[in-house]
Image (tube, rainbow, N blue to C red):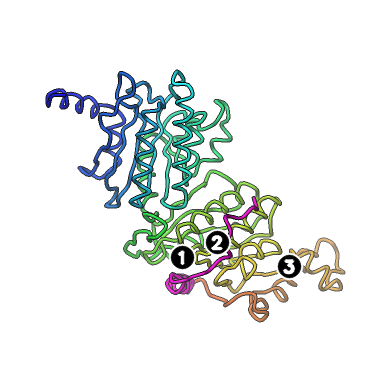
């Protein structure tokens, strides 16, 4: 091919929507394309792929190209995307996949099935080795949806559909970590999320300048973490817990914050996902625990297993109630936490206040029904207090909230050299 034809071909590719998205995603001037001239039939492969830097961090990425065959998956496109996964595996850098197509080239038949299989295998091999983020800009259906949902985090434009079937709106939201308003918002959120990710499972997330929180921030997490550093994931799912990433004195941590109610199934799922990801990449997990227990057996099982299996640094702060199963699952020795602290007014109990009062002090409950709640709460403050828990050795210390940031920051620093040898096995079988 002559230099003139090469120049024309390059100009044609650079004028497509996918190429423009990639140059917007990467730092200015840093994007290096790979397999630029790979062909798929009479056209170029239906995706733009390459590497560069995002906020100075090395990243591999691909974007399906709606301007070429509507971005339809083909064996040529799959080969191009697999090369991105292979390079990321060799060099230890995150992968961001931007999905924007109308399906696959079905006329390729079984060859397309094999291509999909190779791509899914590459994504699975990479899981837990480098972070993976999927950005879904338009409907992503069938096998493409499986590939996209295999990433650690999915960022989806709110009107897009990510599912096996075209009408499975609920399913696509359950797989989505972050909802975006539009394409530009989705790209921005992907770039922001990368700032909390290590390059691979042998490195640490990028540090940042410490920014002290505001004293009048609305919640204990906001008053503890660096100002403006909180990034929620799965925030549209569940009502009893918040999960996400933040910075504590400049260092990245994952956090779980429960709001006092029984933990529901969606909250159990997102807590499990966050803890498992943090464990894979050795990101410390700080849990702010205030809960009456679990509302669902499945949630209790998955959360208990996630905390017990995780060997990353784990610190729990009991901010309100830690009752029964939820204490066992997310605090103390049962959850294999390294440190468990409690605020002075918190309560630690094997049962809720009413049941504990009836069982442990039935004589105190011989009052009119209208007064029993107040009596049970008073009993809990006197008998199930943080101080009593500290006396019994089920928590390490009682911490005032105004010293919590300092205590947690120093504790994370001390735990960063944590080493745990686990029993040899392939993986847990607890779902």
Magenta segment: 402-431
**Few, some or many C-alpha atoms within 10 Å of disc 3 (few <14, some 14-19, many ≥20)?**
some
Q: Which residue is mark 3?
A: 350
Secondary structure at numbered mark 3: loop
* Residue for point 53% across, 56% down: 275
Disc sitting over residue 224 in the figure: 1
Name above or below for residue 413 compared with residue 305: below
Question: Label 3, label 1: how many angstroms apart (C-alpha)?
Answer: 28 Å
Nearer to us in this view, 189 or 85: 85
Counting from the top left corner in percent of width and height, residue 130 is at 41, 51
Whether residue 424 is in magenta: the answer is: yes
**Few, some or many C-alpha atoms within 10 Å of disc 2 (few <14, some 14-19, many ≥20)?**
many
Secondary structure at numbered mark 2: loop
Nearer to us in this view, 61 or 170: 61
Q: Which residue is mark 2?
A: 310
Nearer to us in this view, 415 or 39: 39
Q: Earlier in the sequence, mark 2 or mark 1?
A: 1
Question: Label 2, label 3: how many angstroms apart (C-alpha)?
Answer: 24 Å
Counting from the top left corner in percent of width and height, residue 276 is at 53, 55
Q: Is residue 311 left or right of residue 331?
A: left
Counting from the top left corner in percent of width and height, residue 189 is at 39, 44
Q: Earlier in the sequence, mark 3 or mark 1?
A: 1
* Residue for point 57% across, 68% down: 337
Q: Quadrant of residue 33?
A: top left
Q: Quadrant of residue 409?
A: bottom left
């Amino acid at each position: 091919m002559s230099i003139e034809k090469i120049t024309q071909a390059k100009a044609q590719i650079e004028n497509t929507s996918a190429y423009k998205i990639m140059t917007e995603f990467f730092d200015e001037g840093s994007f290096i394309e790979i397999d630029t001239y790979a062909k798929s039939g009479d056209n170029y492969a239906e995706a733009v792929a390459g590497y560069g830097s995002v906020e100075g961090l090395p990243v591999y990425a691909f974007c399906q190209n709606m301007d070429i065959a509507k971005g339809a998956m083909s064996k040529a496109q799959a080969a191009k995307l697999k090369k991105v996964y292979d390079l990321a595996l060799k060099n230890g850098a995150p992968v961001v996949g931007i999905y924007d197509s109308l399906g696959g080239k079905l006329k390729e038949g079984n060859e397309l099935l094999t291509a999909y299989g190779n791509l899914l295998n590459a994504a699975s091999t990479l899981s837990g080795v480098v972070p993976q983020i999927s950005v879904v800009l338009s409907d992503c259906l069938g096998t493409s949806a499986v590939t996209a949902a295999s990433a650690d985090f999915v960022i989806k434009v709110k009107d897009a559909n990510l599912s096996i079937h075209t009408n499975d709106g609920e399913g696509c939201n359950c797989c989505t970590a972050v909802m975006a308003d539009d394409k530009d918002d989705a790209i921005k959120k992907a770039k922001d999320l990368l700032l909390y990710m290590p390059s691979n499972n042998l490195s640490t997330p990028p540090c940042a300048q410490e920014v002290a929180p505001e004293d009048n921030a609305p919640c204990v997490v906001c008053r503890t973490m660096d100002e403006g550093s909180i990034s929620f994931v799965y925030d549209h799912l569940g009502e009893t817990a918040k999960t996400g990433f933040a910075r504590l004195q400049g260092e990245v941590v994952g956090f779980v914050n429960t709001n006092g109610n029984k933990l529901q199934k969606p909250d159990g799922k997102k807590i499990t996902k966050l803890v498992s990801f943090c464990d894979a990449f050795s990101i410390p997990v700080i849990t702010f625990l205030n809960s009456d227990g679990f509302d669902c057996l499945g949630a209790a099982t998955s959360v208990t297993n996630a905390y017990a299996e995780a060997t990353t640094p784990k610190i729990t702060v009991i901010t309100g109630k830690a009752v029964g199963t939820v204490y066992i699952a997310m605090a103390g020795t049962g959850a294999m936490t390294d440190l468990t602290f409690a605020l002075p007014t918190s309560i630690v109990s094997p049962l809720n206040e009413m049941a504990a009062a009836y069982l442990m002090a039935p004589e105190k409950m011989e009052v009119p029904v209208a007064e029993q709640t107040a009596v049970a709460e008073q009993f809990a403050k006197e008998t199930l207090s943080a101080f009593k828990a500290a006396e019994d050795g089920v928590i390490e210390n009682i911490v005032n909230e105004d010293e919590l940031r300092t205590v947690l920051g120093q504790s994370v620093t001390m735990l960063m050299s944590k080493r745990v040898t686990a029993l040899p096995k392939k993986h847990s079988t607890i779902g």
